[in-house]
Image (spheres, grey):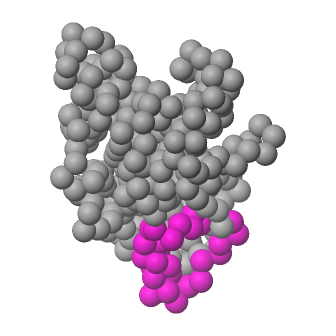
Amino acid sequence: MNIDHVEAFVYVIHYGSFNKAANVLYLSQPSVTARIQSLERELNCKLFDRVGKQVTLTEQGKKFLPYAEQLLRIYQKSKQQLQPNTLLMESINIGCTVSVANYVISDVLSRMQQEHPDVSFRIITGSTDEIMKKLLDRELDVGFVRNVTHPNIQSVKYYVDPIRLYVYDGHPFIDQEKVTVEAISEQPLVFFECGALDWKEIHHFFEKQEFAPNIQFFVDNLETAKKLILRKACIGFLPGMTVREEVAAGRLYEITIPEVAGTALQTNIVTLRGEQPALVAELVSIANRQF
């Protein structure tokens, strides 16, 4: 099997098109197409469905992808071992939840890039379930996800982010010594709903006091929730990591509610059990030093 053909296949997937893969490989698009066609003939199956400029993997292509990526990694590592003085571009495929992608990973990658300028990074954002599946399918090298367990996954706690009530500048709660549940229930609230998070604790907070929260906005994006609060449309419970800059600038204020003090969002770093290449191990080490 020609490794150049396998490389072209992986690059088309990673970069989303034949054109982009050709640019990265310094080839013409017809050359990339020819390599894919040769690979399809050798495997005796169709790897891509093509509709105009859009390409998607066939079922056979999806099955072949993790093996192709593994072949490419093994080839690159073997080449590096045989030619230690040759500068070889390496890459790390990273999966992140939206909150990690928005508020955490850029700091980690900037430090990693300073130490390894020849390494490229591919970031995929998704839900914890999506990232776990891609990791198990060997489409990712490491993931930053919610607290999870799996027999084939090594999962280590990365950080715990407290969930607190935040209000906008000028809100009357800021000057109150104690804010009651009844007072909160009378305010318009934004609620960030995500199945992977235990937001039931916030619901229980109201249920125990027999007050129904006045939820006017249900959203699935933390940035949307934060912007609604900043525009004084509502108040809301958010993880602290998402509002660090706004709190420091005095645009948002944390309101202490003792009853929800233990509510937090936990993020873990996950890798395949027993498989942690040196570069991935170093990335994890840099990430852990951040907290």
Residue 116: image quadrant is top left
Residue 238, how many percent across, how many down?
Answer: 49, 57
Residue 275, how many percent across, how many down?
Answer: 22, 48
Residue 280, how many percent across, how many down?
Answer: 27, 38
Residue 2: image quadrant is top left
Q: How many labels does the image show?
A: 0
Q: In this view, does 214 lie above or below 113?
A: below
Task: Name the residue nearer the viewer: 25 or 265.
Answer: 25
Judge from the rendering whether residue 148 lies leftward or rightward of residue 249; answer left or right. left
Query: Is 145 part of what is drawn in magenta?
Result: no
Q: From the image, which quarter does the N terminus lie in?
A: top left
Residue pictured at 58% horizontal, 42% vertical: 41
Judge from the rendering whether residue 69 lies leftward or rightward of residue 284; answer left or right. right
Query: Is 208 part of what is drawn in magenta?
Result: yes
Task: Name the residue nearer the viewer: 109 or 8.
Answer: 8
Q: Is residue 211 visible from the viewing direction of this image? A: yes
Q: In this view, does 141 lie above or below 17?
A: below
Q: Residue furthest top?
A: 85
Residue pictured at 40% horizontal, 48% vertical: 67
Which residue range is magenta in the image? 191-217
Q: Is residue 165 visible from the viewing direction of this image? A: no
Q: From the image, which quarter does the C terminus lie in?
A: top left
Residue pictured at 37% horizontal, 58% vertical: 136
Q: In this view, does 232 lie above or below 77?
A: below
Judge from the rendering whether residue 112 lies leftward or rightward of residue 19; answer left or right. left
Task: Name the residue nearer the viewer: 203 or 249.
Answer: 203
Residue pictured at 53% horizontal, 66% vertical: 194
Residue 156: image quadrant is bottom left
Judge from the rendering whether residue 156 lies leftward or rightward of residue 247; answer left or right. left
Residue 54, how many percent across, how many down?
Answer: 74, 42
